[in-house]
Amino acid sequence: MQQCPFCGTQWEGGGPCPSCGVNPQKSGDDSLFRPPADRKKIPQEIPPEFEVEKLLRWEPSPEPESPNTESQKEEKEAPILEEPEQSPPCPHKCFKRWQKITAAAVALAVVITAVAVMFWSQPQTLPPEPAFFVQDGMLMALPMGETTQNLGVYNEGMEESLEISPDHQKIAWEENGALKLWVPEEEVFSFSQIPLYAPKFSQDSRFLYGLSPEENENVLYQMDVATKRQRRVGPVGYGTYWEKGSLLVLYDASRFVFYDADTLQEIGSEEINGSIVSLSEKRIYYVENMEDSEGSMQLCCWQDGEKKVLLQNISNFFPNSDGSAYIECYQEKGEPIPITELMNNDLGAEGEDFLQSLEGETVFPPNRCLYYFTGESLRPMGDDLTLYLYSQIDKERIMVSSPGYLSVEQVKGTFPLSELYQLALDFPEISFNAYISSQWPQENPVNFMAVEEKLFRLPENALQNPIDFRSMGNWVCLYQISGQELAGPTLWVGKFEGNNVSYQNSYLVPEASITDFMMTAEGDLYYWAGQHNASFYANGIEISDEVVPESIQCTSDGAVYFLEGIYSDKLALCRMDGEEREILAQQVESFTAYSRDSAMFLQRREDSSYDLFACTSEEKIALAAQQVDKLLPSLLEPLIDGDEMENGDGALQ
């Protein structure tokens, strides 16, 4: 008698089991499940310990691999195999249909989740710029590379010379007259042959430039970042230099010299009295002052040794940091008018002789044309437009006015002869045309906000004579202290819609004046007033009256950070989201804000020393370094850094 090991049936004789058909005497082939004898043991991956650098460092999402078309083709063209002889089925547990469907759905969900995790774009929690701090007297950078980078001994004020390359991969600084360079996976390199200062990277990050004082003038040197080769370019005197692509321009007093940035061969030079506006490969755009016409300039283009005048009679020129500019110029329009027809003789008989001396003199009606210079081309914005106000914060946006000049018939006989007579005595070379144009009567001026070459008309209830403004995204805020029957300092908020700015709100400031204010791209208005413990407002609501005004930092993406509290050892770091205040940490000594989602701060320890922490968009606060001496400010220019606003500096005459 023998018993089947699978179903338990007993029977006499050999062969397979009469119930389940399994032959217990025949051993099954388990090579499919048995590991090969020569297989090496695969070590299990041990998850790395938490490192703050990995928390702070942004890594781009991996690109999806393209499918292997050849393997797909082979798979499609695989030959049909003959079906093997069916052997008795192995006994197994039978799953019900609903269990199979559930398992398939779970497997599909797992696959979809894995794909989503693999290809979902990861947010950049911190800007590429590293945070700099001092620890044990050493200058440290974080994050750069795999670990915190020690850049060497820290000297007071050393941060003023720190320079980060445009590709955010290299750091340069000045140390005791030597120019230092740090590149990932390399030791700090010192260009110490001659004293160098003011390091600056080229736009493609291939070169590092530095100035050297030699014989009462500054000489420009070029350092190759890859080869560390150092070359002398030429003197810049007390001027400066510009670089873009393969073009390098040196300005020495009243002379421009052009070089090829790769070969350092001189391309040409030009004697001018002006300043460069922008570079475009082999072309240089610059504004030149005209000596024969006081207060007049012209926009020129230099290329291949030839100079071309693009625009003349420029009266006002406002350049932007990106090479663009707003340009206002006088242009003759209409028929010339005898100046005697415009004058009102308020001098009596004494003025008759002066009127006779003006016979034959003609002037033109005023016409101020406004242009937008893109950096390579001119775009006309319209006639009878004048630059009215610019903000030192919102440099790419300006306020424009259409003066509303009266007609020639309305102006005839309105200019007092006595004023012109006195001017002629004091300034014999005065231009009557310029004087008449500047004094031409106006009525009902219309104001616009200019964003590049597009104009947005402000409504009649907007502040007519603001002293400053802030604008971001589709929002603008005008500020005025008094006038127009205002009850006090007023902030007027508008929104760009179509070709106009629509009124949204206005706020009466309870204090005599404000220290500064800011408008975000989401339409939130923040302003504060006070010298020591400032009152801080969000959309007209007082958030706190214990804000340290010099600590307020507004980042380029519209985030507002500040320290709150009376005592220095109990300050809280706060971040604003609309009218909601978020307290990030207590007992904060100092901080550096980078963006809406990232900041670094020093927190006081029990032993009165400080630890450095990083705050990211994932609402994580991680310890970055212990026993830190000092946190350095961001090298990127903040939108607002708590300095008191100088009202009226943006007014254009």
Image: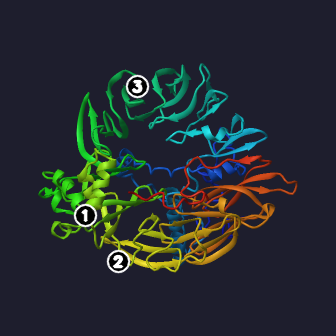
Which residue is the site of mark 3?
262
Quarter-wise, where is residue 642 in the image? bottom right
Secondary structure under the numbered disc 2 in the rendered image:
loop
Residue 317 on image: x %, y %: 35, 49
Q: Residues within 10 Å of mark 2 (few under 14, many from 20)?
A: few
Which residue is at 46% across, 70% downward? 477
Q: Which mark is residue 460?
A: 2
In screen coordinates, is 279 left or right of 565? left
- Label 1 crowd bin: few (<14), some (14–19), many (20+), radius 10 Å: many
Q: Quick check: 227 above or below 292?
A: above
Amino acid beneath label 3 = Asp
Residue 259 locus on image (x, y percent): 37, 26
Give me the C-alpha separation between circle 2 and circle 3: 56 Å
**Total number of numbered discs in the rendering:** 3
Check disc 2 and give the amino acid type: Glu
Seen in the picture, residue 589 relative to 501 is either above or below; the reply is above
Amino acid found under the numbered disc labelled 1: Phe
Element carrying mark 1: strand
Label 3 Cα neighbours within 10 Å, binned few <14 / some 14-19 / many ≥20:
some
Q: Indicate which label's residue lies in the foreground, 2 or 3.
A: 2
* Residues at discs 2 and 3 in contact (Cβ within 8 Å): no
Relative image position of residue 188 (x, y in whole percent): 64, 30
Label 1 to label 2, Cα distance in Å?
29 Å
Q: Earlier in the sequence, mark 3 or mark 1?
A: 3
Which mark identifies residue 415? 1
